[in-house]
Image (cartoon, helix red, strand yellow):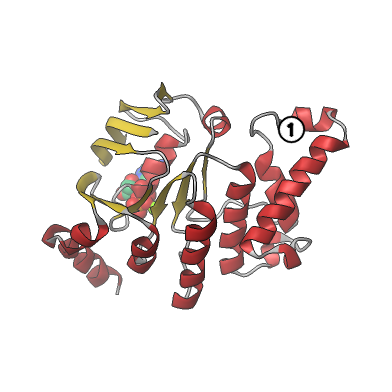
């Protein structure tokens, strides 16, 4: 479904990703973990076309998408949420989910303007369905910037669901949440996001990763240091050392 082949990405002298080769299978749910600055978001940015790698290739469904550009990669069925949230703060909750769908197959903004009410209906219907799925239907007419963080993260999930992508990246979907809120988020991801699609989930909250993912990849300083069954990977000394280091520096 998705392959990274010897991918390197540098920012100036800093190697954000070095020689990363990874395969993700159809409908697999994979956790991507590692300390801050280890290259997790960079990997998402590379696959989703925010920028290209310095070397190496990205293949999606056996098509080379290296340097294809974000819009075209999105149209192929690749969607993501953002660690730092990318929402239209002065737009309604519903408007945010409708806007997310422009650019999906057959739903360019121009098409949308030119078409009759039918297309608009389907964008609206998908948005309403997605908001109901994440439990935001009651706040759909509020401006996005009036929602608290846990609801904003749910709104990002609704935007993804409305586009019905085949491949999804969730970048710290439980960031800033209480344990109870992250438990709710884990359930939402497992029930509504991961079934029938390939998902890569970045999260520091290991309980969420364990609950949602059948496989875990660990990055450290731009290198892939472990990949496999969560129980095994998370008990490797190399991984516990990294995490103890992270806890120490962030406590
Ligand atoms: P993570 O998501 O694992 O916390 P990132 O992928 O965001 O890590 O960052 C990896 C490294 O690359 C960090 O050292 C970060 O400062 C650096 N970095 C990320 N994006 C940029 C950028 N656009 N310009 C310069 N440095 C960057
Ligand atoms: Mg990040």
Q: Give 36 or 229, whichever is nearer the viewer.
A: 229
Residue visible at 78% across and 33% down in the picture: 112
Q: Position of residue 168 (x, y in %)?
A: 48, 45
Q: Where, by quadrant of the figure, is residue 210 drawn?
A: bottom left
In the image, taking residue 236 as reference, residue 132 lies left or right, namely right
Q: Give 134 or 114, whichever is nearer the viewer.
A: 134
Q: Is mark 1 within 8 Å of ligand 1?
A: no
In the image, taking residue 228 as reference, residue 75 lies left or right, namely right
Looking at this view, name the residue that lies furthest to the front.
196
Which quadrant of the rendered structure holds the N terminus? top left
Mark 1 element type? helix
Please determine whether, in this image, residue 237 is positioned above or below residue 63.
Answer: below
In the image, taking residue 251 as reference, residue 95 lies left or right, namely right
Please determine whether, in this image, residue 209 is positioned above or below residue 62.
Answer: below
Looking at this view, name the residue that lies furthest to the left.
237
Q: Position of residue 194 (x, y in %)?
A: 47, 51
Does residue 72 appear in this view? yes
Q: Position of residue 60 (x, y in %)?
A: 42, 29
Residue visible at 76% across and 63% down in the picture: 142
Q: Position of residue 56 (x, y in %)?
A: 29, 26
Q: Where, by quadrant of the figure, is residue 19 drawn?
A: top left
Total labels: the figure holds 1
Residue visible at 40% across and 29% down in the picture: 52
In the image, taking residue 232 as reference, residue 172 lies left or right, namely right
Q: Where, by quadrant of the figure, is residue 231 drawn?
A: bottom left
For label 1, the crowd category at 10 Å Cα-Cα, with few meaning under 14, some 14 to 19 and many 20 or more, is some
Does residue 12 appear in this view? no
Residue underneath mark 1 = 109
Please determine whether, in this image, residue 146 is positioned above or below residue 109.
Answer: below
Which quadrant of the rendered structure holds the C terminus? bottom left
């Amino acid at each position: 479904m998705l392959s990274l082949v010897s991918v390197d990405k540098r920012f100036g002298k800093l190697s954000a990703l070095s020689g990363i080769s990874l395969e993700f299978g159809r409908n697999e749910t994979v956790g991507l973990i590692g300390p801050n600055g280890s290259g997790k978001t960079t990997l998402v940015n590379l696959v989703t076309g925010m920028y290209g790698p310095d070397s190496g290739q990205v293949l999606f469904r056996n098509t080379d998408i290296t340097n294809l550009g974000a819009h075209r990669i999105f149209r192929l069925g690749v969607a993501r949420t953002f660690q730092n949230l990318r929402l239209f703060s002065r737009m309604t909750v519903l408007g945010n989910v409708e806007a997310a769908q422009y650019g999906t197959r057959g739903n360019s903004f121009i098409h949308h303007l030119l078409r009759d009410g039918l297309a608009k209906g389907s964008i609206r219907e998908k948005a309403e369905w997605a908001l109901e799925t994440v439990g935001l239907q009651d706040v759909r007419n509020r401006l996005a910037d009036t929602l608290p963080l846990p609801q904003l993260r749910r709104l990002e999930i609704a935007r993804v669901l409305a586009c019905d992508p085949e491949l999804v990246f969730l970048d710290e979907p439980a960031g800033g949440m209480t344990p109870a809120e992250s438990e709710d988020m884990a359930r939402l991801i497992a029930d509504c996001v991961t079934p029938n699609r390939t998902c890569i989930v970045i999260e520091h909250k290991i309980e969420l990763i364990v609950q949602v993912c059948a496989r875990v990849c660990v990055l450290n300083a731009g290198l892939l240091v472990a990949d496999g069954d969560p129980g095994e990977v998370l008990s490797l000394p190399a991984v516990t050392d990294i995490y103890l280091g992270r806890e120490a520096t962030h406590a």
